Structure formats: C-alpha cells, structure tokens
C-alpha cells in the first residue's frame, strides 16, 4: 500500500514539484507548437522533393516528438532534484526505489502520449490528413506504447544524472539520433544496413511502423508483433535505467560523487 | 542512540587536466563518540573540519572508509534502510525544498516517502506546522518564503515522520537573530518531546545554550569533548584579556605568544582595528607584560573577562 502511494501520489507530486515552472503557455509552445513546426518542415520537404505523402510525415514526426517530453522530462526527474538540492533528501528516504522512480515515469508517459496525440491531430488538420475514427483507439494504444518505451530510454539518462550533470546534452543527442534512426522521416529500409540494425534496438522504430500500419486501416492485432517488440525494447531500457540508478546511488555513497546539500 | 567508533572517511580528488594527479583527502580521521537517548550533542569545528562528512556518514549518505557507526543499534552501512526510517535530518541553507510547491505539498510528498499513512498525514502535517510556527502559511509557495521560514520548513520535514533521532547540520545558518532564537527554542523543544539530537553549528553561544555535551572537531579529529562547562574549564583554565589595537603585525603577535602564562593569542579583524584575544593560564594578571610587548602599537580598549566556550573552542582548534 505504501509503495502504491509512493508510485501514484508520490509520482504525481514530484512531477508538479519539478515541472510547475511549465506554465500553460510554455507547455503549449514547447509541446504543441514546436512539434507542428517539425511536422510542417518535413512534410513540405517531402512535398518539394516528391518523396512521401503528408500522412507519412505527420505520423512519423508526431510520434517522434513524443521523445522530447519522454527523454527530457524523465531525465529531469533526477537532474531537477539535483539542481534544487533535494536529491539528498530523496536518497536518504527509506522509500523503495522501484515505486519512487517508476512512479515518476507515469506522468512523463502521459505527457509524451498527449504530445504525440495532439501533434497527430493538429498536424493532420493543417495538412489535410484525416484519419477514420475507427483508427483512433488503436492509434492511441500505439502512441501510448511508444511513449512508454521512450520513457524507458529516458530512465537511463535520468540514472546517468546521478553521476554527470550534462544530461540535457545527452537528451538532445538522443532526440537527434531518434529523428534519424527511427524511421520518422526516412524509412528504416532506406537506411544503410548498420543504421537499420541500430534502429531495431531503439524506441519508436517499431511504434512508428505500427502507427503507419494502423493509420492505413490495419487492426491492432495485425501490429501486435511490432507493439510487442516496441514494448520489449522499452522494458529493456527501463530495467537498464533502474540498474544504472541503483549502481550510481551506491557509487555516490562510496565515492561521494553527489554534491548533496 | 548514536555511536561512532574510529570513523574515517577519505575522499579522492584529482588535479590537473592533461596530467591528472589523484589525491587522497582525509576528511574524517578516526573519530569516536556516542550520544545518549534524549541528549542534545553538539559537533563544533571550523569549515572543512569534517562535521558535515561525519553527519553524512551517520545518515547513510556516505559510506565510511573504515570504522563503524550505529544509530539506534542499526549499522549505517549494513542496515541503512532501518536507519533511514528512524532518523530525521535538516541541512542548513535555503535550498533543498520544492520552490514551486506549497509548504503543505512539500511535507505531503515527504510524508509519502516516509510511509506516513494517508489518514495520519493531515493530522501530523498540522502538528509539525504548528510546532514550527508555519500554521496559516502552509498553502503558500515556498519560493515566497523568507530564509527563516524555509529553515522552519526544513525542521518540519525533518521531524514529520516522528523520528527518534534528529540530525541538524547548521540549522540557523544565515537566519536573522530573532529567527535564529526561535529556531533554537524549536531545537530545545525537540529534546523536551524525547528526541535525541546531533547538532553541528559555528555559533558558540548556540552550542553553549543548547548542548548537553560537545565534541570539537579540527582537521578531521576530535580535539576536545565534554559538557560546555568542562570544555571551558579544561581548556582556558585562567582568564581572557581582550586588547583593541590598530595595525598590529605578525611579529608582535608572535612575541605576545611568548609571554609566560599565555596559552593562545588570536587576532580578530574589526574594520580598521584588530581585537587581540589573549588566553592565559593560572590566575596571574598579565595585562602589564602584554602591553609592554605592544610598545609602539596604538592600543585602544583593554578588558579582562572569564573564558567563554568560544575561547575554549579557539584554543582547541588552533592548538598544534
């Protein structure tokens, strides 16, 4: 019961504690306006070069932009504590680390989901890409799974935040890597072999493929393999992230590597 | 309740960019002390003496390099979680709080982390808010709080889960005199409700007024331990002569140290003048021989007084 409270209530309060600087106007600009700009940029490049349909870019970029809140916000759940000098108080608490840090992932996943879903909607409306209402529910499932796997990667970056301070640089780097590798704008099949091999181990790659299939009318059962792989990738990253947090927490006690209080 | 046995902590640090050199810094060099139930124990020492490192080891934030420490019978290394459940800790300073949350939400979050049950939370938060005098202000965001209010909130958070042992690391630092007085009363109140407190502070009058016993740390080692009265008696012994001077040089201070019966001389810079604090042993009146050594130096007020804890402290930490 206590762990459940830490997971749900603790996760929610800490999200408010760390992200209440994000007023509705900032939230709107960063997580709604910016992804639409990205969608429009790549869609117009696609049109000018006569490459792919607008739908290809709307789906790819809307999904890819979920990486921004998932990576940055998840990373901030530790880096932000470090900045506010509250990390020591968290680490000396007897709260279980699993509910403590996974609980922080929950609002981040919902944030990523909202960003991707809203970008799909607004980007589609601006470019005249319409989706039949029948694909809304399966598309929502795909978006949720992609946010989850991306947050798993964010958890690794968050864990690194216990050792290094430059996690924002890493988040930017990861967003760039995902933009190129995960098939948002260039189909994975068109990438060089070595890049395609890396793609299959990154979050979003399978989800974007699944989202495009669903947008074309495939049912959720048709893409369950892709979703399973996407989820698997996310779980691997999340487990690795928790292991990194555990490792660096122990190291911080041994080597005094955290400047706390 | 708290026991430190030959506790040591060494940090590794590096210098240089290209040819990096690793250095070992001994922050705590084998200190031992114990704190009894219901006792208010003070750790005094200059900056970098090892006070905060000691506290960090006792609250499980740092592993000792060697030695042992137990809190309420639980080893701080092997039984860290049990220790964490039973202790509260308060670091001085105005950081370490969630600025954009209200005081109430700050406390609510830590109540969750410490497993204070849902139905008990509201009552307990009200109790600690009342105790630290923040009742009525709890719905305001912390970013609008003064330093004193933040420090009260730190204390409220530290005792929220009703811990048996509370660690206070310079809790009144940077707080105005009236606020600091209130905080000292709050700390004294912790003892009346049965808590055991380990306090670090730079303020001697604070330690003198609050602590049952004190350990003085210098360069990572305990150089004196006892009640405030014992420390004053053991170290200073005799009297203290304070002499205001204008432009005293180091050679003169060295000569003063050589006067028979002088145990320590410290120089306190005060704008354009200096205050020489001369500690003497025995009952012999040394004002005349001291003034004789100050020949040629402009001298202002001269006063003789009983030794304070600060004198004892200065003598301990400056002793070779």
Image (tube, grey):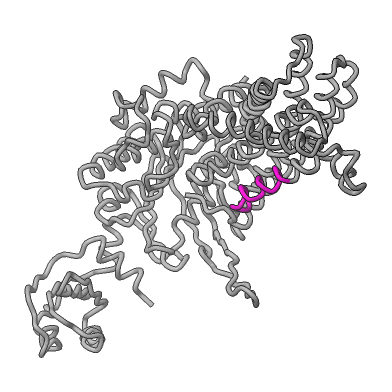
Q: Is residue B24 above or below residue A53?
A: below
Quarter holding residue B225: bottom left
Q: Quadrant of the N terminus of chain A?
A: top right
Instruction: Estimate the x, y position of residue B40 in percent, counting from the top left.
Output: 36, 45
The quarter holding residue A95 reads top right
The answer to whether residue A168 is magenta is: yes
Please report the residue visible at 37 percent of the width from the left and 34 percent of the height from the top.
Answer: B142
Q: Is residue A108 magenta?
A: no
- The residue lying at 26 percent from left, 45 percent from top is B180
> Which portion, as a residue range, is magenta?
A163-176
Q: How many marks?
A: 0
Q: Position of residue A217 (x, y in %)?
A: 85, 15
Does A252 sit left or right of B255 as displayed? right
Is residue B114 visible in the rendered structure shown here?
A: no
> Residue B291, image x and y in percent?
10, 84
- Would you place residue B222 above or below residue A173 in this image? below
Q: Residue at 43%, 30% (x, y): give it.
A: B101
Query: Which residue is rendered at x = 66% and y = 52% of the image?
Result: A251
Q: Is B216 drawn above or below residue B39 in the view shown?
A: below
Report the front residue among A236 and B122: A236
Q: Closest to the observer: B53 or B285?
A: B53
B181 left or right of B119? left
Q: Main secondary structure of the magenta part?
A: helix
Q: Nearer the viewer, residue A45 or A177?
A: A45
Vertical placement of residue B121 versus A199, above or below: above
- In this rendering, position of residue B213 left or right of residue B69: left
Residue B263 appearing in the image: yes
- The image position of residue A256, as x and y in percent, is 58, 56
């Amino acid at each position: 019961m206590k762990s459940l409270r830490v997971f749900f209530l603790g996760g929610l309060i800490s999200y408010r504690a760390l992200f209440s600087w994000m007023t509705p106007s900032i939230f709107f600009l960063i997580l709604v306006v910016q992804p639409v700009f990205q969608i429009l940029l790549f869609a117009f490049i696609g049109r000018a070069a006569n490459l792919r349909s607008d739908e290809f870019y709307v789906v790819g970029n809307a999904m890819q932009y979920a990486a921004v809140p998932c990576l940055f916000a998840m990373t901030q759940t530790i880096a932000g504590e470090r900045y506010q000098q509250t990390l020591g108080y968290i680490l000396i608490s007897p709260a279980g680390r699993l509910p403590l840090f996974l609980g922080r992932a929950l609002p981040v996943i919902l944030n990523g989901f909202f960003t991707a879903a809203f970008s799909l909607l607004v980007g589609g409306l601006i470019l005249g890409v319409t989706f039949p209402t029948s694909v809304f529910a399966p598309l929502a499932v795909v978006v949720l799974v992609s946010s989850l796997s991306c947050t798993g990667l964010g958890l690794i970056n968050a864990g690194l935040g216990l050792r290094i301070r430059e996690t924002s640089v890493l988040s930017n780097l990861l967003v760039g890597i995902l933009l190129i590798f995960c098939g948002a704008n260039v189909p994975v099949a068109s990438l060089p072999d070595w890049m395609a091999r890396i793609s299959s181990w990154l979050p979003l790659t399978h989800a974007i493929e699944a989202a495009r299939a669903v947008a074309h009318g495939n049912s959720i059962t048709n893409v369950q393999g892709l979703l399973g792989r996407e989820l698997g990738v996310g779980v691997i990253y999340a487990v690795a992230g928790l292991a990194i947090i555990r490792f660096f927490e122990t190291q911080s006690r041994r080597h005094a590597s955290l400047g706390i209080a | 309740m708290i026991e430190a046995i030959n506790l040591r902590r060494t940090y590794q640090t590096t210098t240089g960019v290209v040819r990096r050199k690793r250095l070992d810094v001994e922050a705590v060099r084998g200190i031992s002390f114990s704190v009894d139930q219901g006792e208010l124990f003070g750790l005094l020492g200059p900056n970098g003496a090892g006070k905060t490192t000691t506290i960090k080891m006792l609250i499980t934030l740092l592993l000792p390099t060697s030695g042992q420490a137990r809190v309420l019978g639980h080893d701080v290394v092997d039984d860290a979680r049990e220790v964490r459940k039973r202790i509260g800790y308060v670091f001085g300073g105005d950081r370490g709080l969630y600025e954009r949350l209200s005081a109430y939400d700050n406390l609510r979050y830590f109540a969750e982390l410490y497993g204070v049950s849902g139905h008990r939370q509201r009552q307990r938060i009200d109790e600690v808010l009342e105790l630290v005098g923040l009742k009525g202000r709890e719905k305001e965001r912390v970013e609008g709080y003064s330093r004193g209010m933040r420090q009260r909130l730190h204390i409220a958070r530290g005792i929220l889960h009703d811990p048996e042992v509370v660690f206070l690391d310079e809790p009144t630092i940077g707080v105005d005199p009236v606020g600091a007085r209130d905080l000292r009363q709050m700390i004294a109140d912790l003892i009346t409700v049965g808590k055991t407190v380990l306090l670090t502070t730079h303020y001697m009058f604070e330690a003198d007024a609050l602590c049952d016993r004190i350990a003085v740390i210098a360069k990572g080692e305990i150089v004196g331990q006892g009640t405030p009265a014992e420390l004053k008696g053991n170290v200073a012994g005799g009297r203290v002569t304070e002499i205001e001077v204008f432009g005293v040089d180091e050679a003169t201070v060295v000569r003063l140290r050589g006067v028979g019966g002088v145990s320590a001389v410290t120089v306190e810079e005060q704008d354009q003048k200096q205050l020489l604090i001369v500690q003497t042993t025995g009952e012999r009146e040394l004002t005349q021989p001291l003034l004789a050594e100050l020949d040629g130096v402009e001298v202002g007020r001269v006063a003789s007084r009983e030794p304070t804890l600060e004198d004892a402290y200065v003598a301990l930490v400056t002793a070779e």
